[in-house]
Image: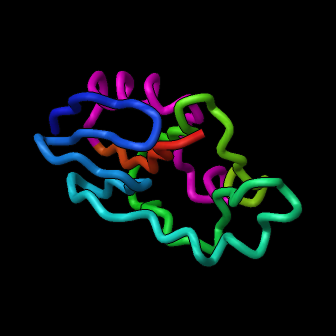
Amino acid sequence: MKFGHFSFGCIQIDGTTYEHDVIIDHGKILKRKKKPSKRFQDEFGHTPLSVEEEIPWKCRQLIIGTGAYGRLPLMEEVKREARRRHVELLVLPTAEAIERLGQDPDDTNAILHVTC
């Protein structure tokens, strides 16, 4: 998987530009469906990542890119679920998450937030 340009609001992966959050699940690129987490928006001031979403847990390592400025809230339940499943959770601003994905892609999935 080759990452190209990343800036606020878009990310380029394998030559395709995405203008929405993406999930990387064993090399497949999917749109993050954050609707299940919207009900927590008032509590966090932003739609957080919650266990209500489809998270690609079947991996050794899950990288969460928290956006250009690192502001994507991550609910505590996500951290607990990662521990329960014995999945190493790395939470980094999206630019750093992309760098990390390039270093250790084996058995690693990701959720990449492309705005804030």
Along the viewing direction, whichever of 21 and 98 lies nearer the viewer:
21
**Is residue 62 in sight in this rendering?**
no
Residue at the right extreme? 43
Q: Is residue 99 magenta?
A: yes
Counting from the top left corner in percent of width and height, residue 37 is at 67, 70
Residue 49 placement: quadrant = bottom right
Residue occupying image coordinates x 82% and y 54%: 45
Q: Which residues are magenta?
A: 80-106
Judge whether 34 appears above or below 65 on screen: below
Counting from the top left corner in percent of width and height, residue 56 is at 43, 61
Q: Is residue 15 left or right of residue 74?
A: left
Residue occupying image coordinates x 69% and y 57%: 48
Counting from the top left corner in percent of width and height, residue 81 is at 66, 60
Q: Is residue 22 magenta?
A: no
Along the viewing direction, whichever of 11 and 112 lies nearer the viewer:
11
Identify the image's colour scheme: rainbow, by chain, secondary structure or one colour.
rainbow
Along the viewing direction, whichever of 61 and 10 lies nearer the viewer:
10
